[in-house]
Amino acid sequence: MSNSLKSACDAVLHRVTTGTPRVPGVVAMATDRTGNIYEGAAGERTLGGAAMTTDTVFAIFSTTKAITGTACLQLVEEGKLDLDAPAKKYLPAIGALQVLDGFDADGNPRLRAPKRDITTRMLLLHTAGLGYDFFNVNYARLAQEHGQPSVVTGTLAALKTPLLFDPGEQWEYGSNIDWAGQVVEAITGKRLGEVMAERIFKPLGMTSTAFTMTPDMKSRLAHVHARGEDGGLTPMPDFMLPQEPEVHMGGHGLYATVGDYCRFIRMWLNDGAGEGGRVLKAETVHMAVQNGLGDKKIKMLPGVIKSLSNDAEFFPGMPKSWALTFMINDIPAPTGRPAGALAWAGLANLFYWIDRASGIGGFWATQILPFADVTSVVGYYDFETAVYQNAGLRKAA
């Protein structure tokens, strides 16, 4: 770790945990293809509690998605999963989903059959027609008026939502990857967490990543906090994803350390090779990181449930595409990230990027709701910028 990189990144972490408004605590790491080049922690796991440390465990929410996508790609390599076959071939339940065509005069949903079948590729690209209630007004109405359970309940009933449009016609961020995880389970005959542990976590040395935390992981857990309108923070110690869920939610259910996730990032930097064995073939990685949306672009995520998310968009105004299963920035980002890099985030303000061209990536972890918290996002951008400016890389033009 260079002195300039350490001092620049440490300054960012100090600033976001001591300023006004602040984050309670943060862990941030950057990695190149061979190992971590920066590791830092600042603040507290819980406001007023134990100090944040680099081995702290976080609910990583939607940064789970890329790991589920990796499990799908492994099955593609083995000839067990055809991304373009109807997903109901493997998981009949997904064939029962209907399209929501608005609501009738009494407020009841009008449903019809979809024009085409959902494929696993659509699930990985978020084009199957599924959404989230905190980003979509129609799903929020189904929850409020018709008792549709939230995905954070970890139940199968939470996944049985209508489609917002015919499969393949639009990009809509939602529960697609939860369904993809169910496809993995149907093909392997094992729970998703077991598949991940055997096929991804073990070869990568990810020893503190799981849907159900071990006692040791719980002892290192950072708690989620709520950001008030006045900028203050309220700890939410009772907020925890179900530890014995009915469904291992491939879209959001994992707990992990930042160090573990950086091992996953390195695998993508290294064309699928992990420190303890190969996870994906190089040709699979090269296929997966391409734009899969054609001319479609991903869109701003409107904060429909304000306690869970603000309006959210990375680099507003910049064109962004989607791969299997990452966001792609189509032009260079102001942080120094070049065009074609991969990235995404988790609901409690966790963010990562994977720059395969430069051979560098990083992960920024806080535990704050709602999503797109300004202090967290600005801190993440500042951290990424500090890495590009001080890691000895040529900054993208």
Image: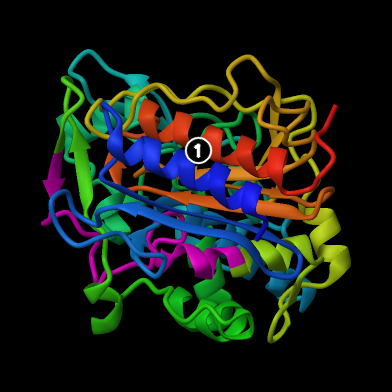
Question: Is residue 272 depicted above or below 332 in this figure?
Answer: below
Q: Closest to the observer: 247 or 303?
A: 303
Q: How many marks?
A: 1
> For the residue marked with disc 1, what is the amino acid?
Tyr
Q: Quadrant of residue 382?
A: top right
Query: At 61% across and 82% down in the image, what residue appears?
Result: 199
Left or right of residue 71, residue 162 in this image? left
Q: Could you say whether the residue bearing mark 1 is in a helix, strand or loop?
A: helix
Percent position (x, y) of residue 125?
64, 44
Horizontal and vertical percent for residue 118?
60, 48
Q: Is residue 55 above or below residue 125?
A: below
Is 244 magenta? The answer is yes
Q: Identify residue for label 1.
A: 380
Please tell me whether residue 117 is drawn above or below residue 78 in the rendered image.
above
- Percent across and percent down for residue 298 are 62, 28
Q: Does any portion of residue 110 appear in the rendered image?
A: no
Residue farthest front in this picture: 3
Q: Sort mark 1 into few (<14), some (14-19) or many (20+) by Cα contacts within 10 Å.
A: many
Residue furthest to the right in view is 283
Quarter of the view holding residue 70: bottom right
* Helix, strand or loop for the magenta stretch, by majority: loop
The quarter of the rendered structure image containing the C terminus is top right
**Residue drawn at the location 71% of the way across and 38% of the way down:** 389
Q: Horizontal placement of 294 versus 239: left or right?
A: right
Q: Quadrant of the N terminus?
A: bottom right
Q: Is residue 340 rendered to the left or right of residue 135?
A: right
In terms of depth relative to the viewer, which is nearer, 96 or 36?
Answer: 36
**Which region shows up in magenta?**
234-262
